[in-house]
Structure formats: C-alpha cells, structure tokens
Image: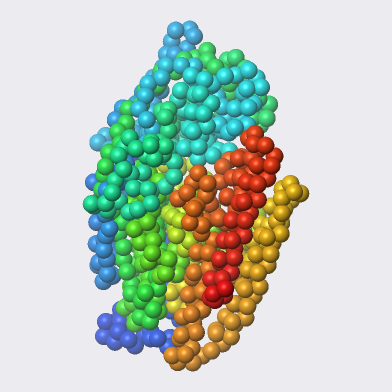
Amino acid sequence: MTTKPTNLLTTKPSPLTTMVTLLILCILSFYAFHFPHSLLSSSTKPSTIQNLFLSSSSNSTISSYLRTLTMHPHLAGTKPNSDTALFLLKHFTSLNLKTHTTSYKTLLSYPLHSSLSSHFKNGSFINLPLTEPSEPGSDMVHAYHAYSPSGSVYSKPVFVNYGRDKDYRALGSLGVNVKGCIVIVRKGGGLGRNTVVEKAEKNGAAAVLIYNDEVDTWRNGFERGHVMKGVGDPLSPGWGSVDGSERLSLDDNEVLERFPKIPSMPISVDAADAVLSSLGESMVPLEWRSTLKIKGITHVGPGPTMLNFTYLGEKKLATIQNVFAVIKGSEEPDRHVLLGNHRDAWTYGAVDPSSGTAALLDLARRYSILLASGWKPRRTIVLCSWDAEEFGMIGSTEWVEQNLINLGSKAVAYLNVDCAVQGPGFFVGSTPQLDSLIHDVTKKVNDPDSEGVSVYETWAAADGGNNIQRLGRVDSDFAPFVQHAGVPSIDIYYGKDFPVYHTAFDSYNWMAEYGDPFFKRHVAATGIWGLLALRLADDPVLPFDYLSYANELRLYRDKLSSMLDHKISLHPLTTSIEEFASAAKEVDNELKELRLLETADQFVEMKRRAMNDRLMLAEKGFLDGDGLKGKQWFKHLVFGPLNDAEKLDFFPGIADSMTRTSTGAIKKERLADIQHEIWRVTRAVQRATSALRGEFT
C-alpha cells in the first residue's frame, strides 16, 4: 500500500430518514432497558423479528469496522493478527455475548529472503522487484508462497501458459522441454497454486513463477498464497492440533507429501512482462494467443534470457486462535447454527477477508439489538472467527476435526462468508437442500445496486439466472464442514475475481473507491447472512427442501450417462436416486402437515424434533469413511475436490476414476474402477435415503 487511508464518502440518508432511524433506535433502547420483554417475545411473528433485524443495518458502521480491521496487515501467527482477535473478542463481549477462544499450535510458513534477476544475452541484467512498494515502517510480509521449499536456480525461463497438462503437451509438440528450466505461469485455467507447482515438478521444471494477468491498474501487485496440498495443519492430519496432542515430525512421509519439492513464488505483471517479452525460440502456440493479456509475448523460450532465482523460507510452529460468540438457544440449545468468516489476511485484507469480518461484527451488533428487545433464538447461534485460513483452512479444519462427533449430531448448518464484497453481483453456493431458503431470503433483502427491487430479482435477471454453485471447491472454510463433516452449508459473496486479490493493494482505500463505495453491498450481504441464520435458528421445522437435492442428483446422473462407456451400468445409481427422490417427496408431504400445526404440545414438539433430526442427518449419508482415493480426508462422494482434467464437477470419486483410467490401464480394469466408484456413490445415496426416512432397513 502506498497511500494512507482517505476519508470515505458513505451514503448520506436524508435528514428525515436519519431522524426517524435515531428515534426508533432510541425508543428501542429505552424499552429494551426498562421493559426488556415488552418488544419481542416467543409469540412475536418471525416477520417482525426479521424486519427489526433488517431495519438496524448501518453502512457507516460496517465502514468503520472495516477501517479498524485494515489499519495493519494481519498475517496468521503474527502479533497484529492476535491483536485483531482481541478486537473481535472485546467487540463481542461489549455486546454482552458469551465468548470464548480455542487455540492450536500449527505449522505455518514465512519468507526470510528472496531475489530474482533477469540476465539478457547482451550481457545486461535487471533485478526484479519481489514485493509492492510500501510505506516506511510497514510490517507488510514480502510476496511469497507459503510452504514453498527454499532453493536457488539459475536457468532459462519457459512460458507454459496456465501450466495445465494440455499446455505442456502443446509445448512438447513444439519440441520445447522444460526440464531444469524456470517455468512462468499465468494464473487461471482452473488450477490452484499447489496444482500448478505439482504439474511443473512432474514435468521436470526446477522452479515456478506465477503471475496474474487479469489486472491492469495494479500491475505491480504480487498475489501471495500457499502451495500446500490438502487442508488443515500438516502435522495433525485428521485430529485437532491442541496442546499435548500427537504431532507428526517434519520428516514424516505423510507430511513431506503435502509440500512441493521445487521452489515457487508470485511475481507481478510488470516483472512477468520484462521476462516474457525477452523470450525467443519457439513461437507461442496459436490456441494461447487470443487470451494473452501481455501483448509482448511472442515466444515461449527456453531463453535466451537467463533467470537467477533464490527463495529462502522457514516453516515453524505458531499459535493460532479461533474466536467465538455464542447466543444460546431457548428451546433447542443443543442444536447449533454456525456462521463463520476467517480473520487472517496476507496483507491489509480489506476484501479478503475483512469485508466478511466487518459483516460478522455487524451481525453481532444487530443480533444484540434483537436480544435487548426480548428475542431469544429457538436454537443456538454461534459466530465463528477462524484463523490461518490463508494457509489452508487451518483454523476451521482443526476445529472441525476436534468437534467432529458433536457436529455430526448437533450442527444444523454452516453459513460461510469469506470475502463479503469483491464488487458487483450476488453469488452464492450451497448444498442443494438449502436452495429454497436462499431464494426466500434474497426476496426480502433490498438490492444494493438497483432501487426498488430485491436481491433475488436482480440476481434472477443476471446471466445464468438464480444460479447456485455447489460446494466442491476447496477455497474457503466451508470445505471441512461439507467435505469432511457432512454439514449442510452455504457460501455467500458479492462480486468475484477482484484485481487486488492477496496483494498489498487490498486496502480500505480500494474498497471505498472500487469495491463498494457506499458500503451498500456490505449491508446486503450482512442482511442475507443474518436472515438465513434467523430462519435456521427460529423456524420450528427446519427450512430444508430435499426435492431440490433429488433433482440435482438426477441432473448429475444424466450428465454422467452421456459420458460413460455403454458397458458401464448406471442402473444401481439410477435406482438409488429414484428412491431418494421418493423419500424426499414423502418428507415434503410430512413437512407441509407439520408446518400447518399451530399447537405446540409435547407430542407436536417431539414430531418436529424427530423430523429435524432426519433433515439434519441426511447430508451425512453422502460421506464415505474411506474417503476419496488418494484424498482420504475428503469424505463427501457428491461434492469434493476435482482434478483439472476432469469434465465433471460432481461425484468426485467417479470423476477421479475416469481420469485415472485414461492413463493406460487395460480396458477391463478401467471399467471395473469406474463401476466400483459408481457403486460407492450408490451406497452413499442409499444411506442418505435411510437417514431422510429415519427408519432402519
């Protein structure tokens, strides 16, 4: 960051609106203090509670939270991040919320020294900058890839486009060999950093430099990130890394397999341009040219330019801290609705993650207004601030592993907000039984960019309509909840692919000028997040719809059918999906009857409780104890991590088997492998059906 924060121009409501708002809040405060149960009670209509929640929004308040959160960089394992945890703790406590923290000692990674110079054939050379210009005295971490091994390489560079398998094949067809070279990769192509480095290593490269060419104004930004495989603390795979617990050694094979063997680091577009425009040898493949943003790239190398690259880093144990605020349920305190956002950032983190952290702080404030007015949630609400997400979802993963049994029986849903606001446009992902709830809630929240319409209406009018993504990605804290614990989940955000991602320019200034100048998108995201939780916490019967899940499974079956060899049978999977759909229809009929019951005697409450248990537990049927082949920690057989060569974004075990079997196994073994994975999914659907029906076979 090169400039100090400037004054923010926030939305200025009319004097009348301001006066009315202040009057309402004053009246609420007076009655809440003197007559704490006079405003809201157990008989208050849900719509009244929801309207009070929505009316207590304040874009200027969220703006002030964000300004405070982004005063300093707050990397996991550092004092500024501990200070940020303390800020959240004090905020929750000041609102009279019950708070606590959980700490873990985990393996993190930090840079010590790096250098990169480009040596040209005329004998000249330039030292390339490896971090953004910063203010004097700034504690900004230099650009690096966490968990990269240390190393020094002097070699020719080769441009490998996105670094996909087909990109290396394209180079091979030109006679270009990357063995021993430093490969330069542009971000994209559906690959994560660790996969890019893994493929480069597999092809014999000596080092990897990655740049993001989707930027213009911020060409001297460096996109930090980690290159570790999997999620969670690498020294405690499968269990929480609490004090006194088992910890693997750094030279354990299971640990070593998590880290790449060749060094890598991010470079800026300016640095990439300086190197790539000097390459010779083979011409850039025709199929790459139309999408290249750096126009000076005409050749891929190797050389004749030489690069001298050095990276020195350290891996060390550091203490991380999750922070929680708990609003205990009045009728079902053992059922928990979890709302989570990570707190740590590579730099100032205005978008990632502090836009979400500011929303979490505002949720706490708005829920405290409801509490002061007499509201008590039916079920327990837990606000979660995760640590060390940027190092591989470590804080949330350790907590999920430590609380796996309780999550299995007590977690209603997990609602994730990472980057609450990146720019315009509403985006959401979920497990399918929550689709209808998302539609209902977005109809009640005003759109931040269009007057007089709801978020739902604007979302429906956008390209793709009310498209809801699925949660097979491994890029935020919902991953351990869905893919390891089988908890129904939602992920919410405004905008995508913002240009200052993980750079020093992800600052309050950028948000105030580009991301959300009036903080209206923050208000909308917070409103949606909070209303989802209110519905899940207060509805007597959980607002789940498994008919949507059944339709999604049918769609996946049909897509899979179009891609398979005719010798592979989908009959068992089809049968299990139709049974699931039948169970979903039966449950839907039961739900309609239950929701019509206005009495709340003990018998009705028991029926509701039994039904809610079935709705909660059905998602866990899709888990398989053995996990995905080669990725055993990931247990979900419908949604999970995928390889770049896969054409499916569902049924990850089947998708993996289709990729594996295309690499040379004899046909009989190939078909048997795919068929086995189909049977595994079949059994998972059967388990989910049994859970949904709530009966033994």
Comparing 384 with 18, the one in front is: 384
Q: Is residue 374 above or below residue 406?
A: below
Q: Is residue 587 left or right of residue 364?
A: right
Q: Position of residue 358 (x, y in %)?
A: 37, 58
Q: Which residue is painted at 49% across and 9% down in the image?
A: 121
Q: Is residue 169 left or right of residue 337?
A: right
Q: Which residue is painted at 66% across and 73% down in the image?
A: 582
Q: Quadrant of the N terminus?
A: top left
**Residue 330 in which image quadrant:** bottom left
Q: Position of residue 204 (x, y in %)?
A: 51, 23
Q: Position of residue 573 (x, y in %)?
A: 66, 60
Q: Position of residue 75 (x, y in %)?
A: 32, 44
By what rule are the colours in the image chosen? rainbow
User: Can the viewer see residue 579?
Assistant: yes
Farthest residue in the top direction? 122
Q: Is residue 37 above or below residue 286?
A: below
